[in-house]
Structure formats: structure tokens, C-alpha cells
Image (cartoon, grey):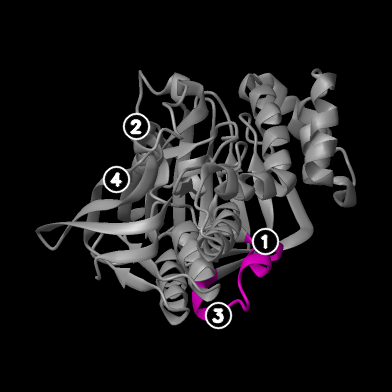
Amino acid sequence: MKKKYDVIVVGAGPAGSMAARSAAANGAEVLLLEKDREVGIPVRCAEGVGEIGLKAVVDEIKPRWICQKIYGVQLISPDEQMVLLEGEQMGYVLNRKVFDYDLAQMAADAGAVVQTKTFVNGLLFTDGYVSGVRLNSLGQQREISARIVIGADGIEARVGRWAGLRKHFAMHDVETCAQVTAAHIDLDPRYCYFYFGKEKAPGGYIWAFSKGEGVFNIGLGIGGDFSGKISAMGYLTRFLEEKFPEAAVLTTVVGGVPCAPPIKKMAGNGVMIVGDAANHANPVSGGGIIRGMLAGKIAGQVAAEAIKNGDVSDNFLNTYSKIWFEGEGKTHSFFYKIKKGIYNLSDEDLNRTARLMNSKPMKERTLINLFKSALIHQPSLILDVMKAFAS
């Protein structure tokens, strides 16, 4: 590492690697920092993405990224009704270790310097501007200067907090999550499975995504308001014992996902935030890979342009915020309103929704009709559903 760069990106997940690649490809001198010893480890994600979204952020989809193609979803209500939705679009379950590694390699190929096992523990400030980072790399404390620092450091969002862009979450805006990768799971690998119910996952849901050959990521997220009595891991353990008593657990991970309203100001003087650090996960599903990558691409482009123009001010860098809100941000706001409506659905509401969906012909079993059916007693939210799916 040198002592000075145009742009420093903190965090080499999909959002951070995309920001680094985008900034470097547009002419900036970039340093990409990752606190773990290897990019892509540990995997804290169900690893599912849609084909359309993935094609929007990468030049080509490499077969080595894909563990399983997904052709539909199975939704399981509290009373065990199964609702099949299929045919809307193809999806994939990724190998995030390989996927993240390749994204970091793409950033390096574009000219970024990538450094792992490097923990950023503070920001540098000069005349009211963020001007670099303090870090510990391989046991050595250093200061590295930069015109712009991009925080892609996940839900912890230290960069955003140090820069005054982030505040603490409300409890109901954080999903407490636990996941295992387990073998000996007898489910059809062509589908993703979602289980609902207050007894199974209050304020959230349980998922099962195939990794191929009887191996599934099985996890759950529960609303922060419900995480006091029984932990997410407690709910997951109970579910596995009931549904898959023969499962062999290969890995276990716990963490949090922001299912929060969008942050309107995602940049300040010399600083920007992307991905989970900026609440970019879908508030309903918790999925954030594609949205984080889209944000990273925009942020990297704006950062490179700011360097060329010699203007790294709050005013210039918030061009990124404006571009984001004109596209994904509007959809995010609609989904957050929908989330608040879904959050309070009772088990009987969910059972009623399943019965109603199963009464429809297969071609009418779509996500938009699912949300409309679930929120039938909250008509004011139906318009938000229409807007979200029209965006």
C-alpha cells in the first residue's frame, strides 16, 4: 500500500468490489480493503439472486458462480399450505465465496489495489472533509490518505457512523438472522422455500435455498422486536429438529440485516456509503446483493468523476444519492411501506392468503397478486404494491 490514493473502499463484499472496480475503470487510483483474511469468507447470506438483476450488474454470468438454478418458489403458510409461484423469472443460488472473490479480482483487473486482513479503525479528517483512514494491516498501524472514502462495511457501517451519515436502527428495522448450510435435506432443488408463521419466525420468515446435491442454506430472520425471548438460532434449531431431523449441519453463521427505510443522504465531504451500510437491502425480502452492486457501480462512477473535477464536496458526491433515488430508491421506499403492512399480519391472515392464492390459476399466482391478496384488508397499501412492481 502507498500512503495516498484517490479512493479508498472499505469492505470487499459485492457492493465494495463493484465500487472499487467502477472507480478504477473510470480512471481513479483505488485501494480496496477487506478486514477478513480472504475475500468471500465468511458467507453471511442466503446467496440467492434473480437472473435479470445479475445481468444488470455483470458483463457475463460465469458458470462457476452458480450452485443451483431456481425455477420458482414454494411458500408454506403456518397451517402448512404450499403455494407454488413459478415462471416469472429465473433465479440462481450463488457460491458467494467464488462470486465475491471474482468480483474483487475484477476490481484488481480494473486497476484497484486489493489488501486483505486489514481492519479500518478510524477516519482521517482535514478541514471538515474525510481525508483517509486509520488501519491495522498485519499487525501494523498506519494512516492512508485519500480524496474519497467509500464505506461498504456492512450493517456495522463504521465508516458511515464516523462520518455522521448513519444513526442507530430502530429495533423493528433490523432482522436478526441465523443460517446453517446443511446436508441430507430432501427438498426439490429447483425451488426456493419460504416458511411463515409467528411460531416459526415472528416478524420474518424461514428460507431454504439449494446448494446442490441435497445441500441447502437454511436460515431465518426474525424482526428485532421479537428477538428478546428466543434467539434466531433458537428458532432455527427448533425448525431443523422438527422438519429435518436427519440434517447434517456443515456451517453456521449469525448476523443482522437492515430492513430499514432508505438513507436519503448517502454522501458527505469526501465520503460515501453503499450496500448494507446504506440500508440498500430490500426491506421485504432482506436481499441486498444486486442492489448493493448497483449502488457500488454508481458510487464508483461518481467518485471518479469527482476526482477528475477536483470536487469531493458533499454537494458533488450526493449526485450518487440523487441517481440512486431516481431508480432503486423509489422502489425501496414503496417496499418499506409494504413491509410495515406485512409485519403485522396474523397467522390467519397468512393462511387466508395461501387459500386465496391456491384458488387462482397458476398463471395468476404472481408476486404482485400475492402482496395484493395479503394486504386485502389494508387497501391503502395496494397502490404502493402497484408502484413497487411498476418501478
Q: Which element type, helix, strand or loop, lies under badge 2?
A: helix
Q: Give the camera-side residue of 74 and 186.
A: 74
Residue bearing mark 4: 123
Q: Which element type, helix, strand or loop, lies under badge 4?
A: strand
Kindly tell me whether residue 270 is visible in this rendering: yes
Left/right of residue 241 with respect to residue 220 in the rendered view: left
Say few, some or many: other residues with alpha carbon within 10 Å of mark 1 (under 14 / 14 to 19 / 20 or more): some
Q: Which element type, helix, strand or loop, lies under badge 1?
A: helix
Q: In the image, what residue type sits under mark 4?
A: Leu
Residue bearing mark 1: 53
Q: Which residues are magenta?
A: 50-67
Determine if the magenta segment contains residue 355. Answer: no
Q: In the image, what residue type sits under mark 3?
A: Pro
- Distance, label 2 to label 1, CA atoms, is 33 Å
Q: Between tags 3 and 2, which lies in front?
A: 3
> Mark 2 vs mark 4: which is more N-terminal?
4
Question: Image point 83% across, 28% down: which residue?
Answer: 382
> Mark 2 vs mark 1: which is more N-terminal?
1
Q: In the image, what residue type sits under mark 2?
A: Gly
Q: Give the camera-side residue of 88 and 383.
A: 383
Q: Between tags 2 and 4, which lies in front?
A: 4
- Distance, label 4 to label 1, CA atoms, is 33 Å
Kindly tell me whether residue 189 is visible in this rendering: no
Residue bearing mark 2: 234
- Distance, label 2 to label 4, CA atoms, is 38 Å
